[in-house]
């Protein structure tokens, strides 16, 4: 009997079509402008840096996202790309621990808006306890020993995940057409 010593971690790239995301796309020319780290194929456990309150884009920080009742519910036409990467059991545990640490101290964290300017000019802007979405996900992988880029996490973009050869495509299309979402919850939206 062969024992599987690998675990899947998912990365969800999204485009909600908001004014802010359209502004980001002007600089990036990339199809997706938000990235989250996901622990399950059903999209029940998702973490990122983004809106703390769905209707308020100005209050942002570390969040546990909810595809059914969070920000996405207000943007029914959200497009997404779900990627998968296999990691060792040790890396998986470290990723979980890093996320747990962020979650336990979530009130300390806020959004690194200035860091987005750094990405635009190609200069990493690190601010204590501040992250933007792709910086956060890249930092989680880095702190867990999953080295994906030589680039500082403050210069990693959502498109870098899309282009990385270690990620496998799971799904691309409308978020609410993703086949593994709970149909009962979707009927409420």
Image (cartoon, rainbow, N blue to C red):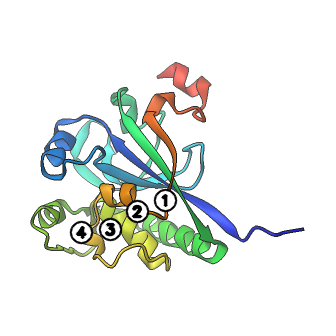
Tell me the distance, in whole angstroms, between the alpha carbons under discs 2 and 4. Answer: 14 Å
Q: Is residue 149 left or right of residue 11?
A: left
Secondary structure category for the residue under label 2: loop
Tell me the distance, in whole angstroms, between the alpha carbons under discs 3 and 4. Answer: 22 Å
Q: How many marks?
A: 4
Tell me the distance, in whole angstroms, between the alpha carbons under discs 2 and 1. Answer: 6 Å
How busy is the neighbourhood of tag 3: few (under 14 within 10 Å), some, or many (20 plus)?
Answer: few
Dot 3 corresponds to which residue? Answer: 108
Relative to 143, residue 3 above or below: above
Q: Position of residue 79 (x, y in %)?
A: 37, 35
In primary-sequence order, the first of circles 3 and 2 is: 3
Dot 1 corresponds to which residue? Answer: 167
Q: Residue at the spot x=17%, y=48% of the render? A: 24
Asked if marks 2 and 4 touch (Cβ < 8 Å), the reply is: no
Dot 4 corresponds to which residue? Answer: 155
In primary-sequence order, the first of circles 4 and 1 is: 4
Furthest residue to the right? 1
Work out which quarter of the rendered image holds the N terminus and state it.
Answer: bottom right
Residue 107's disc number: none
Tell me the distance, in whole angstroms, between the alpha carbons under discs 4 and 1. Answer: 19 Å
Q: Position of residue 61 (x, y in %)?
A: 30, 57
In primary-sequence order, the first of circles 1 and 3 is: 3
Dot 2 corresponds to which residue? Answer: 164
How busy is the neighbourhood of tag 4: few (under 14 within 10 Å), some, or many (20 plus)?
Answer: many
Q: Residue at the spot x=37%, y=53% of the render? A: 35
Q: Nearer the viewer, mark 2 or mark 4?
A: 2
Q: Quadrant of residue 69?
A: top left
Tell me the distance, in whole angstroms, between the alpha carbons under discs 3 and 2. Answer: 31 Å
């Amino acid at each position: 009997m062969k024992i599987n010593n690998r675990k899947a971690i998912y990365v969800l790239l999204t485009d909600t079509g908001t004014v802010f995301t359209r502004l980001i796309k002007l600089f990036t020319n990339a199809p997706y402008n938000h990235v989250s780290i996901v622990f399950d194929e059903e999209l029940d456990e998702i973490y990122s840096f983004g809106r703390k309150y769905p209707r308020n884009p100005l209050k942002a920080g570390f969040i546990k996202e909810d595809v059914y009742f969070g920000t996405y519910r207000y943007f029914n036409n959200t497009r997404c790309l779900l990627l998968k990467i296999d990691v060792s059991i040790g890396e998986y545990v470290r990723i979980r621990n890093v996320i747990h640490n962020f979650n336990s101290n979530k009130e300390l964290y806020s959004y690194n808006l200035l860091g987005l300017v750094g990405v635009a000019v190609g200069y990493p802007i690190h601010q204590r306890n501040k992250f933007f979405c792709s910086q956060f996900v890249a930092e989680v992988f880095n702190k867990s020993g999953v080295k994906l880029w030589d680039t500082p996490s403050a210069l990693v973009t959502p498109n870098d995940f899309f282009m990385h050869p270690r990620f496998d495509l799971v799904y691309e299309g409308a978020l609410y057409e993703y086949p593994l979402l709970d149909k009962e919850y979707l009927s409420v939206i």
